[in-house]
Amino acid sequence: MMFCKHPVFVYGSLMTGFGNNRLLTGYEGEATSLVARYQMVSLGHFPALVQRIGLCEDPVVGELYHVDDQTLRQLDLLEGVDHGFYKRVSLALECGRIAYVYVLNEEPHHRNFVGESVHDNDWRAYVARRT
């Protein structure tokens, strides 16, 4: 039995039905939303969260998983935490819990990657509209 102590909120390619969800095989996700002031943007085949500017109040739609140490390390590798692409931060969820969330490291050299806004902060709906 795995000891799962790390709550992780995912909102893009790690969600159920997307390719990177394979890293969360064996874990059960719970639909929830992130209420912190972040805007989802498209980076092409995957999204990122950037700090919101203005009054956009849409919560970020995603899933909450509780993972073990090894899986958290795998997620950090996928998200490029060691290379500074994303950073892992603790944020409040709609359900009242705190979870790790991967947000874009907004250093100046990463701003070039930011694409269009995902206006409703829902990657699944955004992908469905584009196909």
Image (tube, helix red, strand yellow):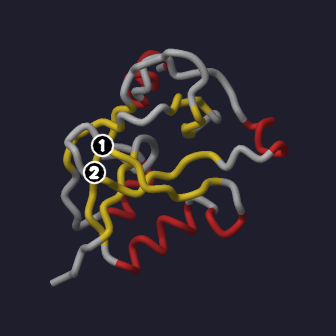
Circle 2 residue: 64
Point out which mark residue 93 bears.
1
| Number of the front mark, 2 or 1 | 1
Q: Is residue 113 above or below residue 127?
A: below
For marks 2 and 1, give the CA distance: 9 Å
Where in the figure is residue 76, as x and y percent of width and height? 53, 66
The crowding category of the residue bearing disc 2, from other C-alpha atoms within 10 Å (few below 14, some 14 to 19, many at least 20), is: many
Q: Nearer the viewer, residue 66 or 28?
A: 66
Where in the figure is residue 113, as x and y percent of width and height? 74, 37
Q: Nearer the viewer, residue 13 or 87?
A: 87
The crowding category of the residue bearing disc 1, from other C-alpha atoms within 10 Å (few below 14, some 14 to 19, many at least 20), is: many
Looking at numbered disc 2 in the image, what kind of residue is underneath it? Leu
Looking at numbered disc 1 in the image, what kind of residue is underneath it? Leu
Q: Identify the residue shown where x is 64% and y is 35%.
A: 43
Q: Residue 2's quadrant in the figure? A: bottom left
Q: Farthest right residue? A: 109
Q: Residue 93's quadrant in the figure? A: top left
Q: Identify the residue shown where x is 47% and y is 20%.
A: 131
The mark that comes first in sequence, 2 or 1, is: 2
Where in the figure is residue 75, as x and y percent of width and height? 48, 65
The answer to the question of whether label 2 and label 1 lie on touching residues, with beta carbons closer than 8 A, is yes
Where in the figure is residue 91, as x and y percent of width and height? 40, 49
